[in-house]
Amino acid sequence: MGWLRRVLVWMAWCAAFVGSINLFLVSRAPNPYHHAEPRTPSPSTTLQYRTGSTQRVYLRGEVYSLRESNYHERKKYNRKGLSMLSEMYIHLPAIKSLYASPMPLVQNLVDNLLANVFKRRVTDDPWDVARSWATPHSLVPDNARGLGDVLAALSSAPIVAADVGYKGTQLKVTLLLKGGQRAIFKPQWYRRSELIEGEVYAGADRHNGEITAFHLSRLLGYNMVPLAVGRKVSLKHHILPVASKKLSSTFFTRRGGRTCFYGVCYYCHKDSSVCDDGHYLEGSVIYWLPSKIPLLHLPHPWARSYKKNKNSKENIEGNRYCASVKPNLPDGINHRFYD
């Protein structure tokens, strides 16, 4: 039986050696959730898909059209995509010369919006100004004097407390800023040039989508999107020292000294944490609506179905759907829903 004992010992040593090699390789593997420093895309850049494939995308005023594109080979689903209409470039010089000068009305609108954003030192109490603007029908007036001060305060006011986000499926942090103003911080997950493949709801929220939505709402005269601005924070120095116990328990440090956290939400867990670059984490800060604004909980009429064998109501009723929804909306809500 001595030879059997020697064989078993030899096999145990081999298993231990292989296990140690695997452990070493895993520890040296790059973190898939590494938060890389975002790059500013050039006028012509290549977008990187998560599958490794690339697609050339042009950013200099080219003309695109909607197309159907297969995006899930196994399920054979289609979704709308963008394709560039190269043949239209023949006419592009003539179009540019014809519309070289924008309409005075449009130019004045854009100039006024920009003036509101960039003008500073209009008020000493930006939080009071923002509260005075908010009504059940508008969060920001068309001529928002002091908007630059409010956005500057959101992006730079000291953080005096931080807690987990309130409900929802996305990672976010509730902030209390100096002066008593609450706000939401949504972190950056992806580089601006990164595209996410998969289902239409795949991936996490884009933090700059909140900022884009706010400025677009003002441009369209909708004015119902909460104020939002970009901000870089130090998780180690700005958030963690003032974080609640529930939030701070989700913080940890990765190799290289990067600070990470995963917060509390429906899909939040350590495997999908977000990290700084060793110093800062970029994100968007969103203004918390004042308590004087009455809120209603209304199921979204165009909420999609996440079940493969169940169609949403609007897909079943088609063009009749809007006619069945609008009569059942509370008074004063109809004007917020567009066909």
Image (cartoon, rainbow, N blue to C red):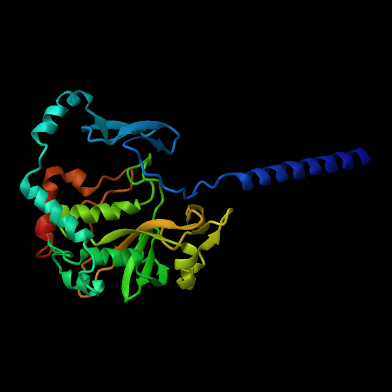
Give residue 157's quadrant in the image.
bottom left
In the rendered image, residue 114, in percent from the top left (x then y), is placed at 19, 55
User: Nearest the camera: 295 or 85?
Assistant: 85
Residue found at x 45% / y 67%: 238
Residue 169, visible in the rendered structure: no
User: Nearest the camera: 248 or 202?
Assistant: 248
Residue 52, visible in the rendered structure: yes
In the rendered image, residue 123, in percent from the top left (x then y), is placed at 21, 72
Residue found at x 85% / y 43%: 9
Residue found at x 23% / y 59%: 118
Residue found at x 21% / y 62%: 119
Give residue 55's quadrant in the image.
top left
Side of 73 where 250 appears, left or right: right
In the rendered image, residue 319, in percent from the top left (x then y), is placed at 12, 44
Total residue callouts: 0
User: Nearest the camera: 204 or 253?
Assistant: 253
In the rendered image, residue 88, in percent from the top left (x then y), is placed at 17, 26
User: Nearest the camera: 106 or 46?
Assistant: 106
Compared to residue 144, the image places residue 272 above or below, namely: above
Give residue 225's quadrant in the image.
bottom left
Quadrant where the N terminus sits is: top right
Compared to residue 219, the image places residue 46 above or below, namely: above
Side of 259 where 46 appears, left or right: left
